[in-house]
Image: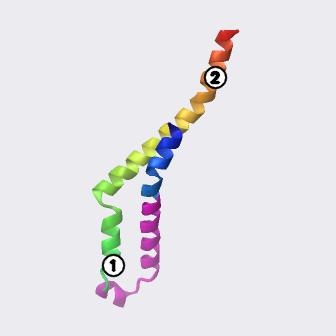
Amino acid sequence: MAIFLYFFFSPYELYLSWLDLQLIYRINDIDFVNLLKDDGLLYVFKQRFHPWMTAISFLSLLSYISALLFLAWQPLNVHDKAEHSE
């Protein structure tokens, strides 16, 4: 289950990281002349922080937390079964 959740949201996380890199590069190239001419920064910013993008980002964070919980409690279940079988 944890592997499924990780691979299900990995393309989305790669896309978000690409958008983050675009924002970083555009913010580093800001000067006052280009800021008034170019609306590419605003376009990338709106695309990155769109409500659907932030909602899916929150869901992916929850899926990663649940995947970690599945991985953390899985050895406890095996240990618990071994104690009851003895």
> Which range is magenta?
14-37
- Which mark is first along the chain, 1 or 2? 1
Query: Is residue 64 shown to the viewer in this render?
Result: no
- The residue mark sitting in front, 2 or 1, is 2
Whether the magenta-drawn stretch holds residue 21 is answered as yes
Q: Amino acid at mark 2?
A: Val
Dot 2 falls on a residue whose secondary structure is: helix
Q: Residue at x 36, y 64 (%)?
A: 48
Q: Nearer the viewer, residue 35 or 7?
A: 7
Quadrant for residue 50, please give it. Answer: bottom left
Q: CA distance from mark 2 to mark 1?
A: 53 Å
Q: Position of residue 58 (x, y in %)?
A: 39, 48
Residue that sits furthest to the bottom in the current view = 33
The numbered mark at residue 78 is 2
Q: Residue at x 41, y 83 (%)?
A: 30
Q: Position of residue 64 (x, y in %)?
A: 49, 44
Q: How many numbered tags mark residues here? A: 2
Query: What residue does disc 1 label?
Result: 40
